Each structure stands twice: as C-alpha cells, then as structure tokens.
Image (spheres, rainbow, N blue to C red):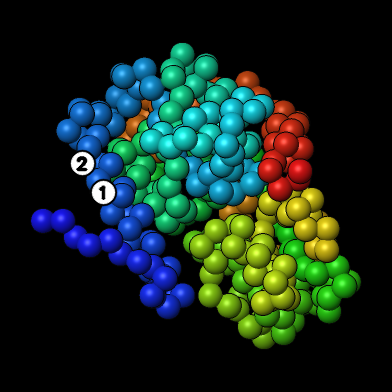
Amino acid sequence: MLLPPFNLKFLSFSEERKMRRFLSLALVLVLCLSMAACGKKTEDSLSDGVLTVAMECAYAPYNWTQPTDANGAVKIKDSNDYAYGYDVMMAKKIAAALNAELEIVKLDWDSLVPAVQSGVVDCVIAGQSITSERKQMVDFSEPYYYASIVTLTSADGKYANAASVADLADATCTSQINTVWYDTCLPQIADANILPAQESAPAMLVALNSGRCDLVVTDMPTAMAACVAYPNFKLLDFSGTDGDFEVSEEEINIGISMQKGNTALCEAINGVLATMTADNYSAMMNDAIAVQPLSE
C-alpha cells in the first residue's frame, strides 16, 4: 500500500525535529536490511574491498557537502553531491592504506552510532568524542584529532570580554545535540538559560548569528571555521587556565568508531594513525578550514 506524501511544513518546529529524526532512523533500518540482504559481514567488514564510512557531511571543517569533486572530494553514496573536509581526508588515507575503495554514507548525527552498531557502515569518521557513554555502544580507534573546547559569542556582545567560564554566568546558550559541549559544558555555566540542543553544528551557529542566544560552546576547529564564515563572532579560549570548562581527556579526544568486537578493523585503522603525528593532524585541519565552503 502506498502512503500519501508527508509535508513537514504543517508540523510545529519541535514536531518537525522529531519527525526528521524518526525518518533518519528509519533510513538506517532500511539500509541495515538492505545490507543484510546483500550479505555484508560486519565481522570481516572489508572482505568486499570497500571501506564504508558514515558522516554528517554537514559539520565543517570536519565534513561537508559540495556539488563537485573539487580538492579531492568523494561522491556520496546514492547522491549527486560530494563530501569533503578533514574527515574525508582521513578516510581517504585509511582506505588507501588498507587498499580499499572508499564509500561515503551521509547520515544525520543521531543516526551515526546506530548505523555502525548494525553494520550498515564499517565505521564512523565524524568528529565524535571518545566518551564513556559511546564506548558502551561502539569501539573506538586511537584519537585522530585532539580538540580543545571553546566558546563562541558575538564580538560586540555582553560576553565578548569573558576570561573564564564564571564570566559567562546568566548567558542564554545552546550547542549541538548529543555532544560533550551541550551535555557537560553548558551546565557548568552558572544560572545559564540553556536552550534546546541544536540538530547540527550549522544550526548551532545560525542560532548564535541570529541573536537567539548569547553564546555557543563547541570545539576549536568548528569555532575557527565559524569565525571565517561569521566575522562578527569572537572566539573565547579558556584552555590552560583555572577558568576553563571541566572535561575529561576522553571528552576532547576525537576518534573513529566501529562495531564492537571488530578488532581487525580497529587494529588496521590504528596502524594508519600510528604513522601520523599531532602536527600532521593540525596541518590537515588547517587545509580543511582553508577550503571549506563557508570560507569562500
């Protein structure tokens, strides 16, 4: 039986968010069933010679969507668009080292972990922090980036001269859903008016630029890229001071996630990362920031 087309414009904002999340998770289920029908084996995930990597393709400078293959972008599966950014650069290095073809799957943030758990994809390379909560659901590689946590605010706003988290008291703030920025950092701001979490990093930045909030908390690469796109933003970095956000080392280490028990893939990826240094990571990130669409 065919269902009539569903028009999201008749939903409220909150209802639309829920419906989009439902549809995304439904897509993961469909992909999972499709993979099962095609015989995809998660315990030997590269037996087909393809490394299937999921990311948002909407999280510059880690990953984004663009219309051409400029700079070495990779075609997104089942799309006419291409993916590029730091995560794609890293995925290409790993695929090349493993002598595998690279396939990029575009999913929203909340669908990434279910996709790797179910074996729809081999791994997720999407700027994920290696948190204890996520480690209960998936396995992680060694860090492929170390991202300090910073604050973005308006350059001419009330909090532009803040020198510590304490100076952010009473701020109206938000960040991206299911991140250490939202779940751990925002509650550390005294008497904060914490708005609902944003579906994506771009949505978070739009909230700040539109004046719906005083500040957002994010990581350094995202903030650096945002300041290129939004010259009216000011980056506040409290790291190395007593006034910084209190987070564990694991919460600022960015890793590649894969299905639990997939030790062969984990060891292979770690072997590639072992050939790189923190300076290599920084250079790659700077290259990504330089060519991100928002910087044009």
Q: What element carries label 2?
A: helix
Residue 122 in percent (x, y) is at 38, 33
Q: Would you place residue 8 above or below residue 28 in this image?
A: below
Q: How crowded is mark 1: few (under 14 residues within 10 Å), some or many (20 or more)?
A: some
Which quadrant of the figure contains the N terminus? Answer: bottom left
Residue ID at (53%, 44%): 57
Please tell me the numbered disc located at residue 195. none
Residue ID at (42%, 56%): 110
Front residue of this view, candidates 42 and 248: 42
Q: Would you place residue 218 above or below residue 213 in this image?
A: above
Please tell me the numbered disc located at residue 33. 2
Under mark 2, the amino acid is: Leu
Residue ID at (68%, 43%): 293
Residue 20 in percent (x, y) is at 39, 62
In this figure, what is the number of numbered marks?
2
Residue ID at (79%, 51%): 228
| Quarter of image, res 88 | top right
Q: Residues within 10 Å of mark 2 (few under 14, many from 20)?
A: some
Q: Is mark 1 on a helix, strand or loop?
A: helix
Callout 1–callout 2 Cβ contact below 8 Å: yes
Residue 145 in percent (x, y) is at 64, 40
Residue 64 visible in image: yes
Left or right of 154? Residue 115 is left
Which quadrant of the figure contains the C terminus? Answer: top right
Residue assigned mark 1: 29
Q: Most extreme residue toward the front, as rendered?
A: 4
| Quarter of image, res 103 | top left
Front residue of this view, candidates 228 and 265: 228
Residue 220 visible in image: no
CA–CA distance in space, label 1 to label 2: 6 Å
Left or right of 60? Residue 290 is right
